[in-house]
Image: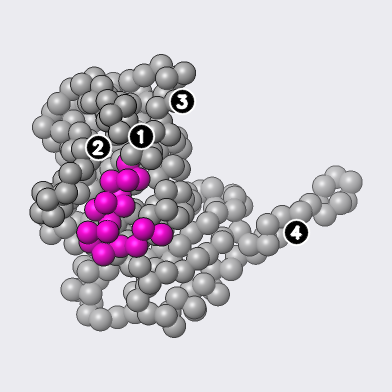
Amino acid sequence: MEKETLKFPSQIVEEVLGNIPYAHLSGPGFAREIARGKPVKEVIASKNLALLKQLKDLFQVKHRARWSRAKVKKKEPSSLLQISITTDLIGIQLAGAVKNSLAIGISLVEAGMENPEIDKIRPNLINFGLKEMIKIGKVMGGKEKTFLGPAGKGDLILTSTSPLSRNSQFGRNLFSDAQKMRQDIRKRKITVEGFDNTWALYKLGKMYKIDLPMINEIYNVIYRKVSPEKTVRNLVKLTVLD
């Protein structure tokens, strides 16, 4: 989401280029892992049904056959990219923005707690965050099915737990040196999508008068300079009270 205007990419494209065919790809996959042949489920969203069909056919990327040393053909998934389609363009884009922000908070908690504890708390944080995603999504016209699918819950889990995630890395580093992380991102030394997304989602919550306690806590640690330690305690408390 654009920080200043709260617009989605599709809205910006329409504003600049007019009413052209537009589709949005989202889901739990990192480019380098896909390039290495790891199967992944992605979602393409568009209001244009003809474009959706064309893109789904185009993205049917097949595995090359692989053979073991014994010359036995190994069984592989039929397609490298498993693509589903939807017309819920707003829901798909919103899910991507929300999971970026939530991943910062979840990884912040992970950095501030001992491993045995976080293994118990992480699933609760993911579920709590998913509820906030659905809450704001319904108000903005998204479908609950979208948020429970690969582009919502699936991408939230991956982004919150993978060391390849920039948002997850930022959350962990925020706990160890919050001041440096805030400075680095404001000077654009690093790219963290959830930084601006958190600002936008906080503003949307106020605009629609929605209670988003998890987003609010992440906003506070980034923009109001609340200590990471206090934020960890507050986020964990949310899952206990839920």
**Outermost residue, front side:** 241
Q: Is residue 141 magenta?
A: yes
- Label 1 residue SS: helix
Q: Residue at x 20, y 21 (%)?
A: 230
Residue 125: assigned label: 1
Q: Is residue 185 above or below residue 20?
A: above
- Whichever of labels 3 and 2 marks the residue nearer the N terminus, that label is 3
Q: Which residue is mark 3?
A: 119
Q: What is the CA distance from the residue labelled 1 to the residue labelled 3?
A: 11 Å
Circle count: 4
Q: What is the CA distance from the residue labelled 1 to the residue labelled 4?
A: 40 Å
Q: Between residues 39 and 156, which one lies in front from this camera angle?
A: 156
Residue 196 placed where, x, y %? 20, 47
Q: Left of 26 or right of it: where is 90?
A: left
Q: Give the residues in magenta.
A: 129-145
Tags 1 and 2 in contact by the CB under 8 Å rule?
A: yes
Tags 1 and 4 in contact by the CB under 8 Å rule?
A: no
Magenta region, mostly helix, strand or loop? helix
Residue 65: assigned label: 4
Residue 214: assigned label: 2
Give the amino acid at mark 3: Asp
- Whichever of labels 1 and 4 marks the residue nearer the N terminus, that label is 4
- Label 4 residue SS: loop
Does the image show residue 228?
no
Give the amino acid at mark 2: Met
